[in-house]
Image (tube, rainbow, N blue to C red):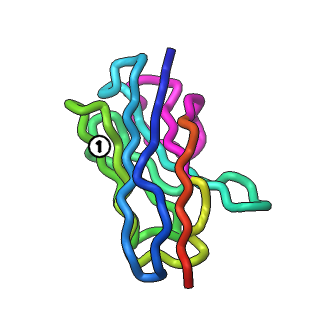
Amino acid sequence: QVHMVESGGGLVQAGGSLRLSCIASGRTFSNYAMGWFRQAPGKEREFVAAINWSGDSTVYADSVKGRFTISRDNAKNTVYLQMNSLKPDDTAVYYCAQDWAGRRTVLTRSTYDYWGQGTQVTVSS
């Protein structure tokens, strides 16, 4: 059974930084792309960033490009989201997710079937 636990959320002032972490278990972590998504109150969940299984390819939503960085440590079964220059619009519950297919050749924004419980990020103005 796939299980993921996010951590690192909190309250930060606009312009500040946070680093989210997500530890995954249940499948061979290094075989699967990982993604970060977020859901703000009253809005649909949206894609934030993804990294491929080997860690050499990433993709970002336009709204976070240049401010957020996704990375992974396959030895620790962990994916990270470094968030800099945070804005009040970044306020949301952030979820990590794992691709359902292993060693996919093309990094996607939508093929994620396994989800963590989420961590709250609040950015004050």
Q: Is residue 94 left or right of residue 18?
A: right
- Residue at 35% from the left image edge and 58% from the top image edge: 19
Q: Position of residue 86 (x, y in %)?
A: 46, 75
Q: Is residue 109 magenta?
A: yes
For image coordinates 55% across by 79% down, the residue present is: 124
- The extreme left residue here reads 75
Relative to 29, residue 10 above or below: below
Residue 60 lies in magenta, yes or no?
A: no
Q: Secondary structure at mark 1?
A: strand
The relative height of residue 20 versus residue 111 in the rendered view (above or below) is below
Residue, far bottom: 125
- Residue 60 rendering spot, x and y as whole percentages: 46, 59
Near-viewer residue (107 or 96): 96
> How packed is label 1: few (under 14 Cα within 10 Å), some, or many (20 or more)?
many
| Residue linked to disc 1 | 72
The quarter of the picture where the C terminus appears is bottom right
The number of callouts visible is 1
Amino acid type, residue under disc 1 in the picture? Arg
Magenta range: 94-115
Residue 26 rendering spot, x and y as whole percentages: 42, 17
Hey, which residue is sitting farthest right in the picture? Answer: 42
Residue that protrudes farthest toward the top in the picture = 1
Dividing the picture into quarters, in which one does residue 114 lie?
top right
Is residue 32 found left or right of 2 in the rendered image?
Answer: left
Rendered residue at 40%/29% (across/down): 24
Q: Quadrant of residue 115?
A: top right
Residue at position x 58%, y 77% from top? 88
